[in-house]
Image (cartoon, grey):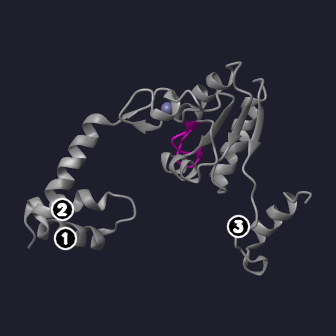
Amino acid sequence: MIGTEIEHLIKLIGRLPGLGPRSARRVALHLLKNREALMLPLAQALNKAADVIEECPDCHNLDTQRPCAICASSVRDRGIICVIEDIADLWAIEKTGSFKGYYHVLGGTLSALDGIGPEDLSIPHLLERARDDRVKEVIVALNATIDGQTTAHYIADCLHSCNVSVTQLAHGVPIGGQIDYLDDGTLAAALRSRKAV
Ligand SMILES: [Zn+2]
């Protein structure tokens, strides 16, 4: 029989994304066996992060400063806003070093099934930002899933009333990809987004 405290720990760990009950038990045991080296520093880091990290009021990114370091930057291009579903997408794009505009984190996608409407995401706030005269382009960089694309179309429709051009990421053959291995949907999208060379 497992003690109540351990059971509680396993339950909490099991609520982390990607961890089932078996993985949660393994993580809990690993932490308990590495109390000094891992468990205590992790607990401290969690406490500190919960204390100092806040949501940016401008773009909904997370940072220790308000507005976040990206929104506070004066060297980035005020004319472009890149809309993404999640902060992980922002990190991925930042890592490429090839985007120098600003971001807007939606916090999810529209979903009739889960009852998520525009008000539940930061879509009204995005429209407000897009009405700023300095903004010339909004890149809708949402996932190529059904919900992602439905949300992208909805946002593009809403943005028509704002004086901005709306673009989206190209879909197609990944760098290093082989045509023979692509699924039909990706290959069809690549054909549709072909461009002159
Ligand atoms: Zn920000």
Q: Counting other residues with Cα less than 10 Å from the Cα at mark 2, is it few (<14), some (14-19), or many (20 or more)?
A: few
Q: Secondary structure at mark 3?
A: loop
Kind of residue at disc 1: His
> Magenta span covers which residues?
103-117
Any magenta on residue 109? yes
Q: Which of the marked residues, 3 or 2, is nearer the chain's N terminus? A: 2
| Residue toward you, 178 or 120 | 178
- Asked whether the viewer can see residue 39, the reply is yes
| Residue 85 position in % (x across, y down) | 56, 45
Query: Dominant secondary structure of the magenta stretch?
Result: loop
Is tag 1's residue or tag 2's residue first in the polypeptide sequence?
Answer: 1
**Is there any visible trace of residue 59 in the rendered image?**
no
Amino acid found under the numbered disc labelled 2: Leu
Is disc 3's CB within 8 Å of ligand 1?
no
Q: Is residue 70 shown in magenta?
A: no
Q: In terms of secondary structure, where does tag 1 sit? A: helix
Determine the secondary structure under disc 2: helix
Residue tagged by mark 2? 38
The label on residue 174 is: 3
Circle 3 crowding by C-alpha within 10 Å: few under 14, some 14–19, many from 20: few
Q: Which residue is labeled 1 in the image?
A: 30
Q: CA distance from mark 1 to mark 2?
A: 9 Å
Q: Residue furthest bottom?
A: 180
- Residue at mark 3 to residue at mark 2: CA–CA distance: 38 Å
